[in-house]
Structure formats: structure tokens, C-alpha cells
Amino acid sequence: MVISDENRSKPVNPTSFQGGMNCGGNRKVGQNRRALSVINQDLVAEGRPYPCVVNKRTLAEKQDVCEKKQADPVHRPITRRFAAQIASTQQNRAEGTKRSNLGNSNSNGFGEVIFVDDEHKPTDDQPVPMSLEQTVSVHNELDQMEEVEMEDIIDETVLDIDICDANNPLAVVDYIEDLYAYYRKMEGSSCVSPNYMTQQFDINERMRAILIDWLIEVHDKFDLMHETLFLTVNLIDRFLAKQTVVRKKLQLVGLVAMLLACKYEEVSVPVVGDLILISDKAYTRKEVLEMEKLMVNTLQFNMSVPTAYVFMKRFLKAAQADRKLELLAFFLVELSLVEYEMLKFPPSLLAAAAVYTAQCSIYGVKQWSKTCEWHSNYSEDELLECSTSMVDFHEKAGKGKLTGVHRKYCSSKFNYTAKCEPARFLLEESL
């Protein structure tokens, strides 16, 4: 390729070739190419080594930019022809042979004049405007940030409820998960058939409810531990499921069950005489000891069973319960101990439903966190049947003849928990 005579006669003005666009937005005819020799001459004078290509501005740039700024050279790999040409130019300038205009000759020592033509550049070599690269990068970063924020909002994390007891050896943090996995595995052995009363010929469900309601008051009078009450009820049901009992001996069964539970759980055990006294001397000491012997042999001395109490403590911890929530949950679960129909629920489900119902009563809305679900292994839907029954018992507490639990939790000792409003909305939603 050669420069026309018209262009050869005009002095070369490097700035006239810059940009390929005039300020009016139209391309200038004959100014869209620039000889490499001219570029070399300008750059050598400025002392910049080995430039080879001028990055010409695109058509989309604003008009005012093309007047003020000049494009910077983009460095590309130097070919042998470029390197030889630059070396020859530098050598001629050192010897004092200055060329007035490299574009006035058809040949520059290599048989042709080299032009840089934007129109014939490969598409891959086209530089991407920096503003576009930054915009794409910023959009990608914003999208990632939005995704992370949405995940944080939607995904609820499961809290480590044992981290506060890491230095407490009595909490056995290293084994606590294994312990409760074992409790869940063995709780079936502590359950009884929910219709075992059909094999009893002289007692019924109502009599059982009267006995347990009375024992809850006795348990409170003696100021015994929670574990003792839950184990007492468990021993009664397991014994009655295997042994038929006449009506007049039913209270004796309850007293002996409490005696055995005290021997297993309490430090200070009530004496036999105290139990005879609270029964209004309905039984003799000999009868108490004989029933004790019969009961331990029928149950094969198996007192180590997971009751609802052990699960209550774990689930209340998962719910980060305060004193109010804890008392209300125990109030609900003790109401359930009286009811024969609640034997169909395993102890872990009974405990989880009590905690869930207590939360609904206090907060006025359904509340069952991922942490509670994780540690209880029960979803909210699995608790609703048991929970609605507890709400029904809560509404009826204090009415009728069986009011022992209600009177117990209406005292200042239990912060008048029985006066808390039940979660009636659970009953309405279940209809």
C-alpha cells in the first residue's frame, strides 16, 4: 500500500489522524489511517521504547472527548519487521540523518509502508472500553451481594445451644448428642399401649385421672423434684399395663410408685409412715412393702427409662426459654399427664408439643425455630395434633373436679402461670 500524491505533498500532522472522527461526529476521509513510521518518529522523540500500535477511539465516544484527549498506545508483541524498522530509525537519527517526512517515500527499506488499520484488526484484538469492563464487574459484584443477603435472610441457622456449657463438666457436652439419641431410641420401652385400660376390669380412665391429679398435689406438698413426678406416672402406667388391680388398691399403687421414684431420683426420701399418713391411713406398712415388692418384680427393676422430663429440659434449652416459658411448658405437660388419651404420644413428642404450645401462648403466634426443630426432630406440623389437645386442656383447667394442676400453678410459687391465656388460635386453625 502507498500514500497518494495528494497526501504526500502535505505535511504530516500526527494529531490530524488521532481518533478518526471530527468533532461533528463524522469520519474524516483520508484520516482513518496513520503510517507506522510517523508513530515511531513521534514516540522515539518522546523517549518511549518499542510502541507499535495506537489505540484509536471508537465511534461511540463523545464529541468533546475527541478534542481534549489523545489515545494512549496499546502494547502488542513486536514482530521482526517492526523491531527492524524501529532499530533502523533510531540508527539514522543517531548518525544525524534526519528524515523530513517518512511518508514521502513508497518504500521504507522493507518494500512497503506499514499502516495500522482499525477496520482490518481481528475482533479478538479489539480493546474493551474500561468503563464497560468496570460496569460488568460492578453488576456481577452487586448480584453476588444481593444473593448472599437473601440467603442470610431466608436461611435460619441452627444455634449451638451447648457452647455456653463447654467448660461445665456436669453438662457432658461431648456426649450430650449421643445421650439424647439413646433416649430417643429407648423411649419406646417406657411407652405403654394407649388402650391398656381395656384389660382392667375394676378401674377405668377416670380413676386413673383422679389418682394422678391427687399425686401431683402430693408431689408439690413434699416439694419433690420434677423427675420424681414424671417417673411416678410412668411406673403407674407400666404396672397397670401388666397387672390387674382392684379399685381399692389403686391409691396404694400410686403411693408405692411415688416411693420407688423417690428412691431413684431424690436425695431425701419420704418415709413409709408419711405416705400412710397422707392416704388417711387407708393402708398398713405391710401392704405398702408388699406392693413395693410386687411392683419392682413386675417391672423387672427397670427404673431407668426416658420420661418427658429429660426431653423437656433439652427442648427448653433449644428454645432459649426464660422462667415464664419454662413454667408454662411444665404446666401444660402436667395437665397432659392426667389425661389418659395423651398416652398415644411418645414422651419426646409430648415435651416438644408443650414447649411449642407455651411459645404460642406467650407470643401469640406460631413459633418453632430451626434450632428447636433440629434438637427435637419434630416439625411444626407433627406437633399440631398434640398441641391443640394441650390448648384444650388449658382452657378447661380449673373447671370441673380435677383442678389439682391448676391450683398448683395458680400459686405465687409458680408465678400464677395457670392464669396465662391459652393459644386459642391453634384451635381455630385446626377446625
Image (cartoon, rainbow, N blue to C red):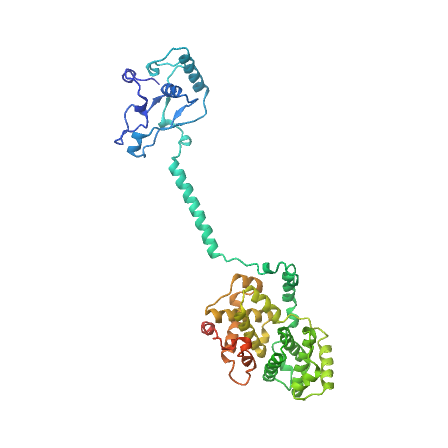
**Figure quadrant of residue 160:** bottom right
Q: Is residue 22 left or right of residue 315?
A: left
- The correct choice, above or below, for 51 with respect to 164 in the image is above
| Quarter of the picture holding the N terminus | top left
Q: Position of residue 23 (x, y in %)?
A: 27, 30
Q: Position of residue 371 (x, y in %)?
A: 54, 61
**Figure quadrant of residue 300:** bottom right
- Residue at 30%, 21% in the rendered image: 13
Number of labelled discs?
0
- The correct choice, above or below, for 122 with respect to 388 in the image is above
- Residue at 67%, 73% in the rendered image: 265
Residue furthest out toward the left: 24
**Figure quadrant of residue 431:** bottom left
- The correct choice, above or below, for 375 with respect to 417 in the image is above
Q: Position of residue 32 (x, y in %)?
A: 32, 25
Q: Is residue 137 left or right of residue 315?
A: left
Q: Is residue 308 left or right of residue 40?
A: right
- Residue at 71%, 87% in the rendered image: 284
Q: Position of residue 114 (x, y in %)?
A: 38, 19
